[in-house]
Amino acid sequence: MRQYLDLCQRIVDEGHWIENKRTGKRCLTVVNADLEYNVAENEFPLITTRKSFWKAAIAEFIGYIRGYDNADDFRKLGTKTWDANANLNDAWLANPHRKGEDDMGRVYGVQGRTWAKPDGGHVDQLRKIVDNLKQGIDDRGEILSFYNPGEFHMGCLRPCMHTHTFSLLGDTLYLTSYQRSCDVPLGLNFNQVQVFTFLALMAQITGNKPGMAYHKIVNAHIYEDQLELMRDVQLKREPFPSPKLEINPDIKSLEDLETWVTMDDFKVTGYQHHDPIQYPFSV
């Protein structure tokens, strides 16, 4: 929690104003931020200085694991995070690759599970990683990437958190996640939860112990219409201790995650928080 607040304060104190053409807004911006999450000790990085809706963050990542490309499938899991990008993005609405309402195109989990090969067929990146880690193999290329420049034109949004690298030391699993761009007031809380949960889940289904998760952000920013709430409200609040995340121990395989897992299989305990803050969202 403290490292999150330190980053927010750093942006407020040291950030540069940058125009964002996609949203038409200015962003107060810093470059390079490194966060760490102790998954081994179950120090769940859920924001406590405002109420955070963690289930939607986990639901979104389960959708990535399943390779979903439709906002309705994400809604059925319990998150509406893709509604706006799928249906309110003017450039995507005019894109000939869009297949209709709620279609997201070839983004995020689609790339992770069915990366198109130029000579035909697809690569299931996640399956390869799971199979290796279950055998205790780390070939120094246990990499899941959603970033496919050759198919940017076929999706509604370039990935923000784009690459996840797993490292195995003995029977302890580590994760390094890379993010090119981060809306800190809104997106980072989601992303922290997802990085932590992804490592916890992968350790569980591959029979390894979770270690540390490392989260590297290149461009961290606060939009101009979020700044007052961050500076004058959230940063004035004292944080509470980190809560704990409980995951159903019956989740034992990638197939479990692909089929029957729901948000009822996750529980957060000891979560104390301040009141919600309604930060504006930029499409």
Image (cartoon, rainbow, N blue to C red):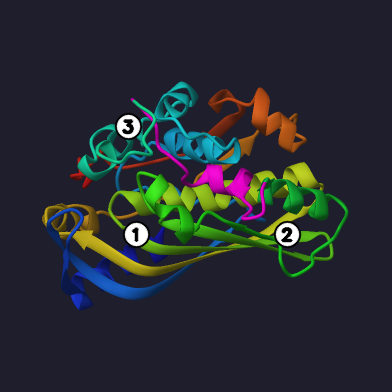
The vertical placement of 159 against 18, above or below, is above
22 left or right, relative to 192: left
Question: Mark 2 = which residue?
Answer: 173
The magenta segment? 101-120
How many residues crowd mark 1 within 10 Å: few (<14), some (14–19), many (20+)? Answer: many
Q: Residue at x 54, y 60 (%)?
A: 163
Towards the viewer: 81 or 201:
81
Which of discs 2 and 3 lies nearer the camera? The answer is 3
Question: Which part of the image, by quadrant, shows the N terminus?
Answer: bottom left
Q: Residue at x 35, y 42 (%)?
A: 273
Question: Mark 1 = which residue?
Answer: 182
Query: SS for tag 3?
Result: helix
Please indicate, yes or no, whether residue 248 appears anywhere in the rendered image. no
Kind of residue at disc 3: Asp
217 left or right, relative to 280: right
How far apart marks 2 and 3 lie (CA) works out to 34 Å
Q: Earlier in the sequence, mark 3 or mark 1?
A: 3
